[in-house]
Amino acid sequence: GPGKYVVTYRVVSGDGHIMSGELHFTIDPSARPTAPKASQDQTP
């Protein structure tokens, strides 16, 4: 449902290197959707 969320992760690569972090986000059902921004990537 609506509210603030935190996703905590911890991964171990094939060589044993550990990485971890957090992703914070909010769900607000009253917010109006926005159009996606045009890509600036000019790669052929």
Image (cartoon, helix red, strand yellow):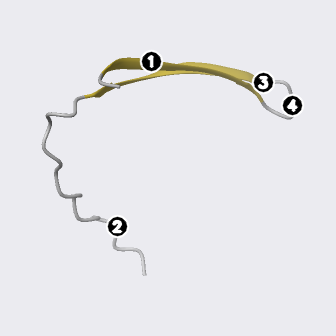
Q: Amino acid at mark 1?
A: Val
Q: Sort mark 4 into few (<14), some (14-19) or many (20+) by Cα contacts within 10 Å.
A: few
- CA separation, marks 2 and 4? 33 Å
Q: Earlier in the sequence, mark 2 or mark 4?
A: 4
Please give the label number shown on residue 17. 3
Looking at this view, name the residue that lies furthest to the front: 1
Q: Amino acid at mark 3?
A: His
The C terminus sits in image quarter: bottom left
* Residue on which disc 1 sits: 6
* Residue on which disc 4 sits: 15
Tell me what residue is drawn at x 62 percent, y 19 percent. Answer: 20
Q: Quadrant of residue 38?
A: bottom left
In front: label 4 or label 1: 1
Q: Nearer the viewer, residue 33 or 22?
A: 33
Q: Could you say whether the residue bearing mark 2 is in a helix, strand or loop?
A: loop
Q: Nearer the viewer, residue 10 or 26?
A: 26
